[in-house]
């Protein structure tokens, strides 16, 4: 059977694709239908066709799947943010568990038996909405010339006006309304990607769930207008200046009517930090490298508790740490699940107090500092300088003195230390031998996974265990294959749903060195 564009088809959806789309088969022909749910019988219109498969647009659900649920957001079909809102949460978890398993088998080359013996059940959320502590809203102009903010439609940069996202915190809406009103009243223009003109590009909002502190950062299409680039000294003095409290009143002007904006934002409960980020580049990277605080503190804080992942309901163990977070630093976006994720990483590291560890891709030192409390020494590596400043301050303020942090790429820093030994310039107190042959290495790379040089150095360092925290099961599986070919074996694998309603999933893995 062959199809052509615009044909109408009726099909039973049997499976969920990696992008969340429904997959159905008619006479051996595969159809991918966005917004269709596994178990639905739907009517769809073919939008694109090849010899063996086709894409279709959902037109009508004839018989709804028993797993179909009422979506919370009216814009869920247009918005590129959520892909699974119409699928029941139990099924979302099942889909993610299967995705991890399939990738380990298909990409990692592990046998189904091996994977099933190691996989623990995925850790879900009790209330899988309003979990995001961070939102990045693009700003643009609609057909009538009005300034709007919202979300990019799936796979495009068209902005869908929406200030009320059900994954985010309720304060987002008021903050965005405040920024839009300020722009209108003061004739501040929105950035236009096509022409490269206009000022405001994005609004970044972050909230510390435990502290209640809120940060707003406006990303503007401009070079920083005075002083040269933000050097390390600037970052440090800004960080420590902030301890003495909000510093409004003496700031440089980066925006028209800047005080008016700050005054309005300051009225919002919890607001403690307003800053400007400079991004004059014509690419689609959201944040530029330079930031200036224009009101309040340069960072917000948040507390993370350790949980006992072996007990029902994952109760707190009584351990907690508080972190300071800069706008440019990475911080896990789902704080409820982050506690479970870090607690698992800590459990998988199996520490007794005697170990030396590396924590690669350490961000602001979150995992490193939890590890440090149960270990002899932790070395953290991270590429963003501001994050390392946050990490050092976080160690100090939590009274942790056995963690050290270094700025650089993991795939450069790790081989350099292994091949050339320790340089005293970089580390205060370091034992070269313990650093070259640590007991445990923890990695938590971005989606693209670990660099090759990083993996091959880990193999040379021969740690007893590697704990791999990953936000992409495909690159995780690829990297685990390299490590397991090099003498390690899978011990435990557990998914953590950091991103309910979306197709993304986080995962923690423990691998152990094989002793011949
Ligand atoms: N473990 C931290 C951060 C994880 S996100 C946490 O849980 O908060 C991944 C981090 O890796 C980010 O902070 C990012 O800035 C950093 N990163 C990206 N590429 C890197 C590289 N090549 N070397 C070191 N760090 C890198």
Image (spheres, rainbow, N blue to C red):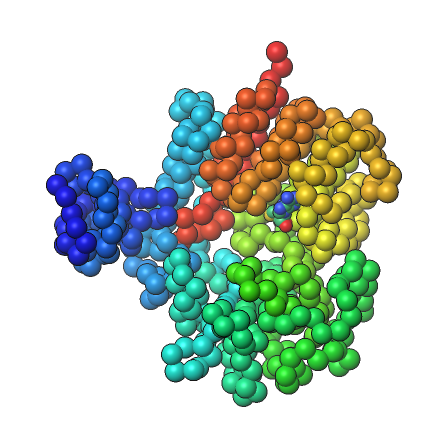
Q: Residue 491 location in percent, x, y? A: 54, 25
Of residues 311 and 388, the one nearer the viewer is 388
Q: Is residue 315 visible?
A: no
Q: Residue 107 location in percent, x, y? A: 44, 31
Which quadrant holds the N terminus? Answer: top left
Residue located 53% across and 49% down the image: 337
Q: Residue 457, relative to residue 265: is it above or below?
A: above
For the view shown, which residue lies furthest in the top direction? 516
For the view shown, which residue lies furthest in the front direction? 195
Q: Residue 46 location in percent, x, y? A: 20, 53
Of residues 310 and 326, the one nearer the viewer is 326
Residue located 68% across and 43% down the image: 409
Q: Residue 84 location in percent, x, y? A: 36, 52
- Asked if residue 464 lies left or right of residue 483, the reply is right
For the view shown, which residue lies furthest in the left direction? 1
Q: Is residue 413 visible?
A: yes
Residue located 53% across and 45% down the image: 447
Q: Residue 470, relative to residue 195: is it above or below?
A: above
Of residues 193 and 183, the one nearer the viewer is 193
Q: Residue 475, relative to residue 179: is it above or below?
A: above
Total labels drawn:
0
- Asked if residue 156 lies left or right of residue 425, the reply is left
For the view shown, which residue lies furthest in the bottom direction? 185
């Amino acid at each position: 059977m062959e199809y052509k564009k615009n044909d109408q088809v009726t099909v039973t959806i049997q499976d969920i694709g990696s992008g969340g789309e429904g997959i159905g088969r008619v006479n051996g022909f595969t159809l991918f239908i966005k917004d269709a749910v596994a178990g639905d019988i739907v009517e769809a219109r073919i939008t694109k066709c090849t010899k063996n498969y086709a894409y279709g647009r959902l037109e009508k659900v004839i018989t709804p799947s028993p797993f179909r649920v009422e979506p919370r957001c009216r814009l869920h079909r247009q918005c590129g943010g959520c892909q699974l809102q119409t699928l029941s949460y139990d099924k979302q978890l099942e889909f993610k568990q299967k995705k991890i398993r399939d990738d380990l088998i298909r990409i990692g080359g592990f046998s189904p038996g091996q994977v099933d013996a190691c996989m623990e059940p995925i850790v879900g959320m009790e209330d899988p909405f309003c979990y995001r502590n961070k939102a990045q809203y693009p700003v643009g102009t609609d057909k009538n010339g009005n300034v709007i903010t919202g979300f990019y439609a799936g796979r495009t940069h068209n902005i869908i006006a929406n200030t009320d996202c059900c994954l985010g915190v309720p304060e987002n809406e008021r903050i965005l309304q405040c920024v839009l009103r300020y722009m209108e009243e003061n004739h501040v223009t929105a950035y236009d990607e096509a022409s490269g003109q206009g000022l405001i590009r994005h609004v970044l909002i972050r909230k510390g769930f435990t502290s209640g502190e809120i940060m707003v950062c406006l990303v503007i299409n401009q070079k920083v207008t005075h002083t040269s680039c933000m050097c390390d000294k600037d970052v440090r003095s800004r960080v420590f200046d902030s301890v003495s409290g909000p510093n409004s009143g003496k700031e440089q002007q980066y925006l028209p009517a800047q005080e008016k904006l700050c005054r309005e934002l300051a009225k919002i409960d919890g607001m403690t930090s307003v800053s400007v980020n400079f991004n004059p580049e014509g690419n689609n990277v959201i944040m530029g490298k330079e930031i200036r605080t224009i009101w309040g503190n340069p960072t917000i804080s948040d507390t993370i508790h350790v949980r006992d992942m072996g007990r029902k309901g994952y109760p707190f163990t009584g351990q907690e740490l508080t972190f300071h977070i800069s706008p440019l630093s990475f911080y896990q976006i789902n704080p409820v699940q982050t506690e479970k994720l870090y607690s698992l990483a800590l459990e998988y590291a199996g520490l007794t107090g005697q170990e030396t560890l590396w924590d690669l891709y350490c961000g602001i030192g979150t995992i490193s500092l939890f590890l440090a409390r149960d270990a002899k020494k932790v070395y953290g590596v991270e590429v963003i300088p501001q994050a390392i400043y946050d990490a050092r301050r976080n160690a100090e303020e939590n009274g942790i003195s056995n963690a050290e942090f270094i700025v650089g790429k993991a795939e450069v820093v790790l081989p350099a230390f292994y091949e050339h030994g320790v340089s005293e310039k970089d580390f205060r107190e370091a034992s070269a031998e313990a650093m070259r042959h640590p007991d445990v290495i923890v990695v938590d790379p971005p989606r693209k996974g670990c660099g090759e040089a990083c993996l091959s150095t880990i193999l040379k360092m021969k740690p007893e265990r590697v704990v791999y925290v990953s936000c992409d099961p495909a690159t995780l599986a690829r990297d685990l294959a390299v490590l397991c070919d090099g003498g390690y074996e899978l011990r435990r694998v557990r998914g953590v749903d950091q991103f309910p309603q979306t197709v993304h999933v986080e995962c923690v893995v423990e691998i152990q060195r094989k002793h011949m």
